[in-house]
Image (tube, rainbow, N blue to C red):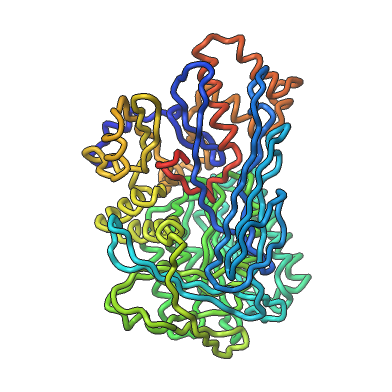
Amino acid sequence: MEENKDMEKASRAEDGGFLKPHIFTLTIPQVDGGSNLSIKVRWSQKLLYQDGQLTLIVPFHFPEYVTPAGKKVSKKEKIQLNVNCGTGMEILCKTTSHPLKEIQRQVGKLGFSYEAEVLTWSSTDFTFSFSVPSSHIHGSVLLQSPSVHDVDQREMFCLYLFPGNQQTGKVFRKEVVFVVDISGSMRGKLLEDTKNALSAALSKLDPKDSFSIIAFNGEIFIFSSSVQLATKEAIENAIQWISMNFIAGGDTNILLPMNKAMELFSHSPGSIPIIFLITDGSVEDERHICDVMTSYLTNEESIHPRIYTFGIGLYCNHYFLKMLAMIGRGHYDAAYDATSIELRVERLFTRASSTILANITIDALEDLDDFEVYPSHMPDLLSESVWTVSGRYKGNFPDTIQARGIFADLNNFVIDLKVQKAKEIPLDRVLAKQQIGWLTAQAWFSENKQLEEKIAGMSIQTGVISEYTRMILLETQGGAQVSESGRVQEPPKTMEYQRLVVDSKVQKIVLLQSLGVGFGNVNATAENSPPGSEEVKLPEAAEIFVKATSNCCAKMCGYCCCMCCIRVCTRMNDQCAIVLTQLCSALAIFGCFSCAELCCSGQDGG
């Protein structure tokens, strides 16, 4: 990208990209009337895990205004679902939103299908839940060789642990210090939603847990000088303190409250210290903050403080927050828009409160000739999520390896994990989004150009967006096709790009806007700009349909429906109608996608 800065000027919002954090569009070139359009999307996401069940949720809700006015369209819905849990254990189907027919059943595998002619398009998202029943912690190791085109020719491995049905399992007591940004940019709804989320988190503390709160801007405001037991009275006092002291204003200084939080812990045996950081800003000394936190976490304590981070909006540096969480063996999450703050903070804190196994180590990795693990600091096993680490290696992987950890009662845990070949699971694609995220955090921290090049190669190979690649549109003779997400250099020398050039004559290349979240905005933070205040101005037509997909149409025009709006569009001039139709098609398909879970692929136009 550094060699093609002049191409930035050709990138326009209407060409394609995120109109809003949850709405992604691609503009379809003008086509002849009566033409059929076929759009293929590759969707990748982490399954939700709760109460021993894994749940897949895929957007499958098509608003009424998708169907063109005055035209009869054949409506056929078809779903094919293949489940491969990789454990070699029995899978139990729990719930499904659509009437699936079982077509395959093997150990560790299930296959289903559904096909029907319908009167109206689906108004229900597709959901499917299943479980791998076990009363104890279990897992496995999957191995796979790289493809001939892989940028990293080392062997791949993925190691995972299921927490099992841990209803009777003991979770660690917590010493939690909430570190919350109250700088000027947090004013209004952002701060109110954060206060509500924090109050909900406090109410979920066990009476044996202990806590404190630090609010910060350029200064710090402390609820208590040490962590105190989460009694009913203490929580009520804390909620009252929040209402009096959470007043948005001032600058952003993250190092000062993080240092103070480390001083508040009592480090009592059997408890796990947790810093829970919430911020919407970026600061200049972020790498120094990472170094300072690392120094705290290299002492001789049996259980170091864990760091959980939560970013709001796009002005904070999400890769700094991800790196901070990785250093502290914690987890990171984000809300790119204010509407999801409460839900996502509550979800992250629920995970932080469910630690059942700490200080996990893997034997035998050190005996390999060369290995790399993502994330580099292994997190704890939580009852609310599946534990996964992956990486690359050279050498002979043993047939079994041992995973070790510490239970909440401080007893040691050891489990033998069987190693097997992942014959039917494309590990490189399954793990790409997670690995690119961790490696990007490391590349930002180390400012390593070679690592950036490696990430770009992984992005091109797997079709997963990154901060160092861009998606391009190739308009070819006879239609438009979308290539792999390409690193634009001389031009991009990807296999997919070369194939398209050979197979058809390229008429036009359009460089789309960056789909990454970026590395924060220190200037916007210094100016206390609220998240989203510098959003690109959308075309007028896009604004109309953003409102249509985000709110009830009655709020937009008082009395008309979305279908009515489209009928009105037919009275506009041809050029305007074409733009509106193109946007409608894109928004109808991508309107309910979540940016936080989205993994875009240039090859299939996702």
Is any atom of residue 143 visible in this view? Answer: yes
466 left or right of 223 in image:
left
103 left or right of 251 in image:
right
The location of residue 175, given as percent across then percent down, is 61, 75
The residue sitting at 39% across, 56% down in the picture is: 436
The residue sitting at 59% across, 30% down in the picture is: 546
391 left or right of 20 in image:
left
The location of residue 548, given as percent across then percent down, is 65, 29
Does residue 563 lie above or below 603 as drawn? above
Count of numbered badges drawn on the protein: 0
**For the view shown, which residue lies furthest in the front direction?**
103
Does residue 440 lie above or below 590 as drawn? below
The location of residue 325, given as percent across then percent down, is 48, 65
The residue sitting at 41% across, 41% down in the picture is: 602
| Quadrant in which residue 542 is drawn | top right
Does residue 34 lie above or below 470 as drawn? above
The location of residue 503, given as percent across then percent down, is 30, 34
**For the view shown, which residue lies furthest in the bottom direction?**
411
Is any atom of residue 222 visible in this view? Answer: no
Does residue 48 lie above or below 168 as drawn? above
Q: Nearer the viewer, residue 49 or 250?
A: 49
Q: Nearer the viewer, residue 149 or 377?
A: 149
| Quadrant in which residue 49 is drawn | bottom right
Q: Nearer the viewer, residue 311 or 394?
A: 394
Quadrant location, the N terminus:
top left
The residue sitting at 76% across, 20% down in the picture is: 559
26 left or right of 173 in image:
left
